[in-house]
Image (cartoon, rainbow, N blue to C red):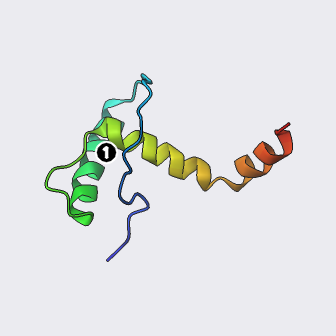
Amino acid sequence: MTKLRLGAIAEDKPVKLSIEVGGAVLRDLIDYARVHASANGLAEPLPPERLVPAMVEIFMSGDREFRKLRRRNRP
């Protein structure tokens, strides 16, 4: 079985952020939420707005160049 990059999503104090995504991206997010729910034993898929922050966090943490430049630019 293939392991999804996105595991369990931790509860955290949310901060409101509005974004726009295309219809195809929204459909993919809905499909991903369904697969994620099944892979993590959730009764219902999470709404896309709960998935996006975790996906962005994983993307940024996996970007080695971002981490390198971030360390270099810290005061």
Q: Up-down: is 51 above or below 35?
A: above
The answer to which image quadrant residue 50 occupies is top left
Q: Residue at x 42, y 22 (%)?
A: 18
Residue beneath disc 1: 28
User: As drawn, is 73 to the left or to the right of 56?
Assistant: right
User: As drawn, is 38 to the left or to the right of 1?
Assistant: left
Q: Quadrant of the C terminus?
A: top right
Q: Up-down: is 57 above or below 62?
A: above
Q: Nearer the viewer, residue 9 or 4?
A: 9
Residue 43 drawn at (x, y percent) = 13, 55
Q: Residue at x 27, y 49 (%)?
A: 33
Residue 52 drawn at (x, y percent) = 40, 40
Q: Residue at x 84, y 39 (%)?
A: 73
Q: Nearer the viewer, residue 44 or 75?
A: 75
The answer to which image quadrant residue 28 occupies is top left
Q: Residue at x 25, y 39 (%)?
A: 47
